[in-house]
């Protein structure tokens, strides 16, 4: 009979091992490590393969009334636009949203998985999980797959007992708490507009307008962003989708064609 | 019947798990422990066997803390208690690490009870021979709680409860005399309950008081003696009042 030393170990089981008296769910889901000669090289290759993938613009910020979350909807494979209608804001549960940047499958799967864990927490503890807790659950999972080629750059936005919450979580295992984030290839452009127009005490309409404008400007300059600018608001009663506007149409709102003096008039040339 | 009490995993024909029941026997032989929940104070009291002269009494603390806001007292096998308390302490920290929040009293009670249950359904191990009384304040709501677990792995919340030796008498006393109390009144109620079955005196009981602001505080022997004296005086006054009813003029 194996000596039970589990009292001396931490409850988090490490990769691959299974304790006799462990409840099955706390184990991190694990896959078998591939049988390669050079595992380090394989890992590096995997990471390099997905590195350029974060072609997108997503942003989120906290303001007086809650959290505003916005994203574009373009998916690109190199120079080919594979879709203009990707849902990049994922509804984890009625009061928490996640944004998608990086590998679409990775983001969708792990956000769905996070939703399951949040629901189980609710059932077991008779109260909703905090945004802090949810983001930490995701970050710990992503950390355990570090170096294996996952590509996830996500923001977890929600409203819990302590008020509005916003965290940035990525596949390197990083997790940051903050009030303003933008993720993706279009983020520098979005930051420019967002940082310029941000005030803490905006109304919901003003904040939505700022978010929409920031996404639009990012899609204008960044080739890998485009499609539809979706804007969501997270308040004390959960999230609500505020708008989803085609950025092509937004262009005429924000970049109207100015009437300019005609330099040269075209004159009809008599047919020779 | 003797055939069904060897291995833990075997039910008897009439639905008993004998090992669990024998574990409850071990609890019944352990030192008395009592817990009382007030509106802003929760008290744990444990019967202390007279310490040997050469023993350092500080090394046999019977009331331990699991975290800043949770404490535990138990009746039964003290060695099993040490193992259970260590696992619970690790879980408290693990919870803080994974969700950045302290545990609620219900959560850690559920964990301890779950652990006790696991050992009633595994091969080659025996159940933990102890029942615990867990007290604490919830980190956000600030509500006081008192829970009890037992070797079978069941747990429930109580306003006041006792376990260990003579727990039935103590519980009877509490049922008769319990009312919502706060502060020092809660402490007095707990000590009065314990004194029903324990020899009077500060050196025979260990008492710890938990409040939201100050956490857990172990009472000194002198303090306990003072409260016992107060209780005795109150009892004497009540006796005198009963014997000689005040004459109305």
Image: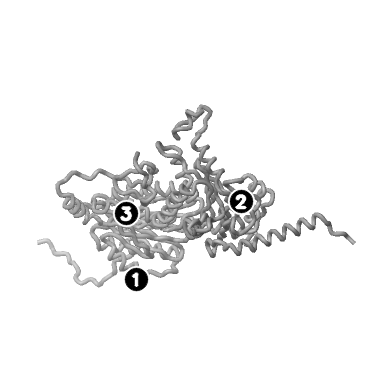
* Residue A120 x, y percent position in the rendering: 43, 46
Q: Chain of mark 1?
A: A
Residue found 42% across the figure and 60% down from its top: A165
* Label 2, label 3: how far apart the Cα atoms are: 51 Å
**What residue is shown at x 42% (from left), y 69% (from top)?**
A200
Residue at which label 1 appears: A196
Q: Quadrant of residue B124?
A: top left
Please tell me the numbered disc located at residue B160: 2
Marks 2, 1: nearer the viewer: 2
* Residue B35 in sight: yes
Q: In the image, residue B118 lies at what x, y percent? A: 44, 41
Task: Report the mark closest to the observer, 2 or 3.
Answer: 2
Element under label 1?
helix
B218 up-or-down from B30: above or below: below
Q: What residue lies at 53% left-to-right and 56% top-to-bottom?
A: B52
Q: Position of residue B245 (x, y in %)?
A: 83, 56
Asked if one can make out residue B139 in the rendered structure from this viewpoint, the answer is no
Q: Position of residue B203 (x, y in %)?
A: 59, 58
Residue A100: which numbered mark, if any? 3
Q: Are marks 3 and 1 on the same chain?
A: yes
Q: Of helix, strand and loop, which one carries label 2?
A: strand
Using the image, determine if residue B113 lies above or below residue B227: above
Mark 3–mark 1 distance (CA, rounded to whole Å): 24 Å
The answer to whether dots 2 and 1 both sit on one chain is no
């Amino acid at each position: 009979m194996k000596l039970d030393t589990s009292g001396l170990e931490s409850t988090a089981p490490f990769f691959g091992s299974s304790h006799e008296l462990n409840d099955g769910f706390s184990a991190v889901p694990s896959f078998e490590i591939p049988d390669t000669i050079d595992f380090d090289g394989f890992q590096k290759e995997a990471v390099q393969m997905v590195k350029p993938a974060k072609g997108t613009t997503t942003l989120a910020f906290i303001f007086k009334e809650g959290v505003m979350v916005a994203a574009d909807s373009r998916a690109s494979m190199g120079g080919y636009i594979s879709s203009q209608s990707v849902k990049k804001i994922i509804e984890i549960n009625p009061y928490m949203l996640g944004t998608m940047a990086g590998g679409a499958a990775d983001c969708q799967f792990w956000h769905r998985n996070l939703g399951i864990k949040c629901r189980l927490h609710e059932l077991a503890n008779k109260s909703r999980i905090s945004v802090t807790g949810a983001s930490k659950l995701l970050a710990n999972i992503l950390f355990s797959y570090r170096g294996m080629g996952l590509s996830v750059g996500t923001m977890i936005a929600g409203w819990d007992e302590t008020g509005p919450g916003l965290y940035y979580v990525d596949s390197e295992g990083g997790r940051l708490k903050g009030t303003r984030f933008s993720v993706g290839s279009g983020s520098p452009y979005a930051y420019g507009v967002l940082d310029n127009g941000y005030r803490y005490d905006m109304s919901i309409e003003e904040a939505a307008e700022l978010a929409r404008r920031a996404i639009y400007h990012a899609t204008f300059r960044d080739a890998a962003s485009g499609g539809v600018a979706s804007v969501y608001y997270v308040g004390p009663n959960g999230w609500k989708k505020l708008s989803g506007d085609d950025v092509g149409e937004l262009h005429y709102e924000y970049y109207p064609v100015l009437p300019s003096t005609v330099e040269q008039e075209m004159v009809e040339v008599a047919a020779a | 019947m003797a055939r069904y009490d060897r291995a833990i995993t075997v039910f008897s024909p009439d639905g008993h798990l004998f090992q669990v029941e024998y574990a409850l026997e071990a609890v019944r032989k352990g030192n008395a422990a009592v817990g009382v929940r007030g509106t802003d104070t929760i008290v744990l009291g444990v019967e202390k066997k007279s310490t040997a002269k050469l023993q350092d009494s500080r090394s046999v603390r019977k009331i331990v803390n699991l975290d800043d806001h949770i404490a535990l007292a138990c009746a039964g096998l003290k060695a099993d208690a040490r193992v259970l308390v260590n696992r619970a302490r690790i879980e408290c920290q693990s919870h803080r690490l994974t969700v950045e929040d302290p545990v609620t009293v219900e959560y850690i009670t559920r964990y301890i009870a779950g652990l006790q249950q696991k050992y009633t359904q595994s091969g080659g191990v025996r159940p933990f021979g102890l029942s615990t009384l867990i007290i604490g304040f919830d980190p956000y709501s600030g509500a006081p709680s008192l829970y009890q677990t037992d070797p079978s792995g069941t747990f429930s919340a109580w306003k006041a409860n006792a376990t260990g030796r003579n727990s039935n008498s103590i519980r009877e006393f509490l049922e008769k005399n319990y009312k919502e109390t706060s502060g020092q009144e809660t402490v007095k109620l707990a000590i009065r309950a314990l004194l029903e079955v324990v020899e009077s005196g500060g050196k025979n009981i260990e008492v710890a008081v938990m409040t939201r602001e100050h956490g857990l505080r172990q009472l000194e022997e002198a303090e306990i003696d003072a409260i016992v004296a107060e209780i005795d005086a109150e009892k004497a006054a009540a006796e005198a009042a009963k014997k000689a009813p005040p004459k109305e003029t």
